[in-house]
Amino acid sequence: MPKIKILPHEDLCPEGALIENQPDETICEAALRNGIQIEHACEMSAACTTCHCIVRKGFDSLDEATEIEEDLLDKAWGLEQTSRLSCQAIPKDEDIEIEIPKYNINMVSENH
C-alpha cells in the first residue's frame, strides 16, 4: 500500500505524519482516518476547495484531475501546478508527499 507523507501544518499536523493509504481511498479519507482533520466543507463531493492540497512528490502517479476538479482548483487559495483536491486524488502504487496550505476559502471551520 502506498504511503502519504503529510508535511507539518501548524494546526492540523504540527509534527507532520506518515500514513498508509488503503486501496481506492482518497488523500482526504486517509488523513481523516488517521486523525488529521483536513477541511472538507462539501463532504468530499468535489463542490468546494477546502480540502486543497499541494502534492510535493508523486504528483505524476495520481490519475489526472477531472474537468470539475480543475475548475474548482482555480478558486483555491495558494494554487500551484501540483495542486489537487484531496477528496478526489487517490494514490495508486507510489508513495506521495503533500502539503496542506495554511489557509483555505472556508471562513469558519465546521469541525467535521
Image: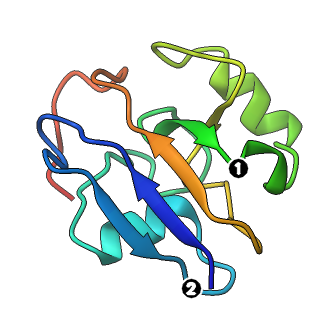
* Label 1 close to label 2 by CB (< 8 Å): no
Residue at (53% x, 61% y) in the render: 27
Q: Is residue 25 above or below residue 98?
A: below
Foreground tag (1 vs 2) = 1
Q: Measured from the top left, where is residue 68 in percent x and y?
A: 79, 36
| Element marked by disc 1 | loop
Q: Measured from the top left, where is residue 34 in percent x and y?
A: 28, 74
What amino acid is at disc 2? Gln
Spatial CA distance of label 1 from label 2 is 17 Å
Q: Is residue 92 above or below residue 80?
A: below
What mark, if any, has residue 67 been given in the picture?
none
Check disc 1 and report the residue beneath it: 58
Label 1 crowd (10 A; few <14 / some 14-19 / many >=20): some
Q: Measured from the top left, where is residue 88 in percent x and y?
A: 66, 54
Viewed as shown, does residue 106 lie left or right of 50? left
State how many labels appear. 2
N-terminal-most mark, 1 or 2: 2
Viewed as shown, does residue 107 lie left or right of 83? left
Check disc 2 and report the residue beneath it: 22
